[in-house]
Image: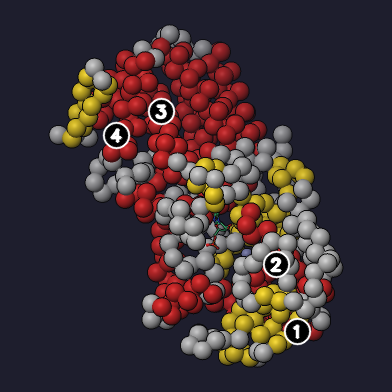
């Protein structure tokens, strides 16, 4: 079946095709570079990466823009506190973000657009909104008048008709159901950086950058706009108000929103302090691909509870697939073809693709993978798997990896981490339990090659480094 997505705007699952030329014009909201991103942020960015890969798997080309918010309240506060110029401060965290993305194997969008490189375009847009009677200025700042945009609330499906006309907010983030006129341009406070422009000295509010850069690079109507659910209101609602007031056209046909990464029932966030950065976890010995796998394993519209056990299970799952691949590459199977195994590989591939096309149902896609691996391993143990079945099985693993990108081990400076070793040990124990002694021996030998010695004791397996 064709690719389909849940569209926040229509509140329906809809079939997706790009509006023109087979190219998906997509805009996703990027990081605010005031600090290292946490893995909650990366859940959303991993979703965007899966989205890219699934769009491409459906034969579409991509023209994807992601902004880098390199000026906002938090950035200015931190840069001033660090006595660093804004650009110097944000470069540190922009570079760190891009490094983290690379470690998590997230593809670069076709264009990264830093807000501060688009100030003149934002000023022009604010002037145009003024001509259209959508703005007013007070004390050097310019506000968007939400009463001038009657369909305000159409994305978040809130009825804002009872809101006070003229009530306004200066901060970039504010409470749900409390729609206010928001700042397009902010007058600088004492000691703050600013740009001298035709609409006065100041800096842009957060929302205008996305409208301006999306329209500049992708045109008036996007195919897809995506981000985390916390952006639906106010950020995306405000983007729609600005963009549609500027162009008179629908701003984006599809709106996709990823649910949160949670910790013990609460959103992972900087302000709650319940977060890990990618760097924290890698320093503890967790492989980036295990983190990627964990973040990808739950469908994006379901919240995902982060636990260390979950992360370990992700590492074990990857290890299982790597061992299966190794077995396919190194075992000597009897010549010929097992028709049933051929049919299983075809079914598994179809189920995998169909699950992803169903609004990126990654959990079901992974279930198809593991069911296939279990069946194929049993067929191998029973001597029923044939040499002629190996290419299709490897091709299916290739299909899996073209989306999940987990099989290639990350290059590490200090050899295998404790978490990697424990994942291998767990995989070996599972193999022994399944009486797959060839596999369990192979895992032991591989570990030995890496200088890890296993000892089977009454209380379980112990390991040590040589
Ligand atoms: P920010 O850097 O704060 O602008 O956020 C970058 C992206 O991360 C946005 O799309 C947010 O919606 C998303 N985000 C923030 N916290 C979480 C979380 N706990 N789980 C998933 N996505 C998040
Ligand atoms: Zn945005």
N-term mark: 3 or 1: 1
Q: Nearer the viewer, mark 4 or mark 3?
A: 4
N-term mark: 1 or 2: 1
Q: Residue at x 32, y 37 (%)?
A: 420
Q: Which residue is mark 1?
A: 136
Q: Which residue is mark 4?
A: 421
Q: Secondary structure at mark 4?
A: helix
Say if mark 2 contacts mark 4, CB within 8 Å: no
Query: Does residue 402 show up?
Result: no
To which quarter of the image does residue 333 belong? Answer: top left
- Indicate left or right for 331 with 3 as reference: left
Q: Position of residue 91 (x, y in %)?
A: 42, 71
Q: Residue at x 55, y 28 (%)?
A: 367
Query: Does residue 324 show up?
Result: yes
- Indicate left or right for 361 with 407 as reference: right
Q: Position of residue 205 (x, y in %)?
A: 62, 76
Cα–Cα span, label 1 and label 2? 17 Å
The answer to whether 210 is drawn above or below residue 60 in the figure is below
Say if mark 1 contacts mark 2, CB within 8 Å: no
Cα–Cα span, label 2 and label 3? 44 Å
Q: Which residue is mark 3?
A: 320
Cα–Cα span, label 3 and label 1? 61 Å
| Residue 239 numbered mark, or none | 2
Say whether mark 2 is within 8 Å of ligand 2. yes
Cα–Cα span, label 4 and label 3? 13 Å
The quadrant in which the N terminus is found is: top right
Q: Secondary structure at mark 1?
A: strand
Tell me if mark 1 has few (under 14), some (14-19) or many (20+) residues whose alpha carbon lies within 10 angstroms of its own: some
């Amino acid at each position: 079946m064709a690719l389909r997505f849940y569209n926040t705007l229509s509140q329906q699952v809809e079939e997706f095709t790009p509006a023109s030329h087979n190219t998906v014009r997509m805009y996703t909201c990027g990081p605010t570079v005031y600090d290292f991103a946490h893995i909650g942020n990366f859940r959303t960015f991993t979703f965007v990466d899966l989205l890219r890969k699934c769009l491409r798997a459906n034969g579409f080309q991509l023209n994807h823009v992601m902004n880098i918010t390199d000026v906002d309240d938090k950035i200015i506060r931190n840069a001033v506190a660090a006595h660093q110029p804004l650009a110097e401060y944000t470069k540190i965290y922009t570079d760190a973000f891009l490094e983290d993305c690379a470690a998590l194997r997230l593809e670069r969008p076709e264009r990264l657009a830093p807000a501060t490189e688009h100030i003149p375009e934002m000023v022009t847009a604010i002037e145009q909104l003024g001509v259209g009677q959508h703005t007013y200025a007070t004390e050097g700042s310019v506000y968007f008048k939400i009463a001038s945009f009657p369909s305000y609330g159409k994305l978040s499906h809130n009825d804002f008709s009872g809101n006070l006309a003229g009530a306004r907010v200066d901060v970039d983030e504010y409470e749900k159901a409390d729609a206010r006129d928001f700042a397009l341009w902010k007058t600088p406070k004492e000691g703050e950086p600013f740009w001298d422009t035709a609409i006065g000295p100041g800096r842009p509010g957060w929302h205008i950058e996305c409208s301006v850069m999306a329209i500049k690079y992708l045109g008036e109507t996007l195919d897809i706009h995506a981000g985390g659910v916390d952006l639906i209101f106010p950020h995306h609602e405000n983007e729609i108000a600005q963009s549609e007031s500027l162009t008179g056209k629908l701003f984006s046909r599809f709106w996709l929103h990823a649910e949160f990464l949670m910790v013990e029932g609460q959103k992972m966030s900087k302000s709650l302090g319940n977060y890990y950065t990618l760097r924290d976890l890698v320093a503890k010995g967790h492989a980036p691909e295990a983190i990627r796998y964990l973040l990808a394993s739950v469908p994006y519209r379901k919240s995902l509870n982060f636990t260390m056990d979950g992360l370990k299970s992700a590492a074990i799952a990857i290890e299982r697939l790597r061992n299966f691949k190794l077995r396919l590459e190194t075992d000597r199977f009897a010549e010929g073809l097992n028709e049933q195994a051929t049919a299983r590989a075809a079914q598994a591939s179809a189920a995998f693709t169909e699950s992803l096309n169903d609004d990126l149902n990654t959990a079901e896609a992974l279930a198809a993978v593991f069911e296939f691996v279990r069946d194929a391993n049993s067929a191998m143990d029973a001597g029923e798997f044939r040499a002629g079945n190996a290419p299709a099985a490897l091709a299916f693993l290739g299909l899996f990896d073209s989306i999940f990108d987990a099989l290639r081990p990350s290059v590490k400076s200090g050899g295998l981490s404790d978490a990697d070793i424990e994942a291998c040990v767990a995989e070996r124990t599972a193999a022994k339990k399944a009486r797959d002694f060839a596999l369990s021996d192979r895992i032991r030998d591989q570990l030995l090659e890496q200088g890890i010695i296993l000892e089977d004791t009454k209380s379980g397996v112990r390991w040590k480094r040589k």
